[in-house]
């Protein structure tokens, strides 16, 4: 499982990629191929972060339900998070 330090490193990577994107846009000669590469890298890392947060959220929610004696509804929530991730991935391309 990813730690908060791993997520912090991911945020640093995203900042670097956004800096690269800004640099490419400010450069007089725009390379659309490079813009696509950078944008895809940003999208992949952001999807990875969202997936990590969703997994942690589901685990914590499930554990809280177990501790409070409520039924576990993780099967329906995991399906909806998969749908969200698929929809988000499809819309970025």
Image (cartoon, rainbow, N blue to C red):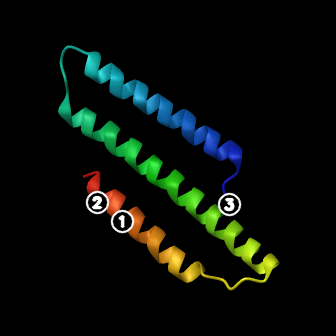
Q: Whole-percent x and y of residue 35?
A: 26, 34
Q: Secondary structure at mark 1?
A: helix
Residue bearing the label numbered 2: 90
Closer to the camera: disc 1 or disc 3? 1
Please name which of the two marks, 2 or 3, marks the residue nearer to the observer: 2
Q: Residue at x 18, y 18 (%)?
A: 29
**Left/right of residue 27 with respect to residue 23 in the rendered view:** left
Give residue 1's mark. 3
Q: Pick the residue in front: 15 or 71.
A: 71
Residue reaching furthest to the top = 28
Q: Residue furthest right?
A: 67
| Residue picked out by circle 1 | 86
**Residue 26 percent coordinates (x, y):** 28, 16
Tell me if 57 is positioned left or right of 22 in this view.
right
Local packing at callout 3 (Cα closer than 10 Å; few below 14, some 14-19, many 20+) is few
Q: Nearer the viewer, residue 60 or 71?
A: 71
């Amino acid at each position: 499982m990813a730690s908060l330090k791993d997520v912090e490193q991911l945020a640093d990577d995203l900042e670097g990629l956004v800096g690269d994107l800004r640099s490419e846009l400010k450069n007089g000669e725009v390379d659309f191929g490079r813009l696509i590469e950078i944008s895809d890298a940003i999208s992949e890392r952001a999807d990875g972060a969202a997936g990590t947060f969703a997994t942690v959220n589901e685990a914590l929610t499930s554990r809280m339900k177990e501790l409070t004696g409520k039924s576990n509804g993780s099967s329906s929530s995991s399906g909806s998070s998969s749908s969200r991730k698929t929809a988000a991935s499809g819309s970025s391309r």
